[in-house]
Image (tube, rainbow, N blue to C red):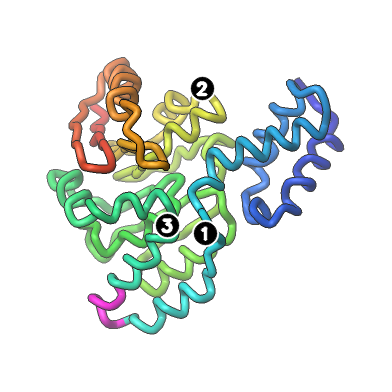
Amino acid sequence: MDLPTSSLDKLAAAIQVTPKYRHLTPDLIRRLGERELAVRGSFKEAVKATKNKLHQVAGAYQESKINYDRALAQLRKTVGDAAAFQHTCTQLLRLHTSTAERLPILDEFYRTTLADLPPIHKVLDLACGLNPLTLPWMPFSPEVEYVAYDVYTDMMAFLGEFMGLAGVRGRAEPRDLLTPPPNEPADLVLLLKTLPCLEQTDKHAAATILDALQAPYLLISFPAHSLGGRDKGMATHYTDQFIPLIQQRGWQITPFTFATEIAFLVKKV
């Protein structure tokens, strides 16, 4: 359905004046807003519904605003001291719910899931959150190219600065993964605890993303618990949904189970 541009522009503007959503990429706001304008009874209801959806897929993972200037200052103080730099990364990872949940398993997560990969020259980290801060734990060569995407413009600016401080070759850019899905070539794609969020905005998102990705290896994970820490049978639910998608494509899959997360290394064959 084609909506009057003025209606969508007005909705996007109404949401972007809200401090909580000021730094979200406009593509995401407009994609969700267009759908809500088409089905809601009034403009006010569409704005409210769009904000609710934005909270579910993005806002819920940041309990409070992150001071990125302070974070960069902390990182700069430890450049050149690998142990201190890694410790600072650990403290900053606590500021984002998704990466905070990974901290208890971080020492084993990448060591286990990526142990048998061939040399990796380019990585795409999709809907990354603060995950690029875990680069000190990843088993990649110093020459690896690392590309990170997420929907927050201020977070991506921070991560771009972080990569420079960490001596990482790469970039961080704001992007809604469904407008359009990324299809640039890479050796490995990280899609960590992301597919459930995408499917809240588009029930076909998982298949769309999987078919677009141009990489021989995908590391895909799902949360084992809700944001409130409840089990709810989530691991079984996501496994039952995900494995058929991979089997339909004839790809190989290796599962991993951790205390807070389930992961699958997918090899396209």
Q: What residue is pinned by disc 2? A: 203
Residue 243: quadrant of the picture: top left
Q: Few, some or many C-alpha atoms within 10 Å of disc 2 (few <14, some 14-19, many ≥20)?
A: few
Q: At which x and y percent is residue 7?
A: 84, 35
Residue 155: horizontal and vertical position, in percent? 52, 60
- In the rendered structure, which segment of residues is drawn in magenta? 80-85
Mark 1 and mark 3 lie on one chain; the one further toward the N terminus is 3
Distance between the alpha carbons at the discs numbered 3 and 2: 25 Å
Task: Pick the residue in front: 264 or 71.
Answer: 71
Image quarter of the N terminus: top right
Residue at numbered disc 1: 156
Q: Residue at x 22, y 42 (%)?
A: 259
Q: Earlier in the sequence, mark 2 or mark 1?
A: 1
**Does the segment drawn in magenta span residue 121?**
no
Q: Which residue is mark 3?
A: 130
Mark nearest the camera among 2 and 1 is: 2
Separation of residues labelled 2 and 1 (CA atoms)? 26 Å
Please say if 221 is above or below 114.
Answer: above
- Which residue is pictured at 75% across the width and 43% down the height? 12
User: Quadrant location of residue 221?
Assistant: top left
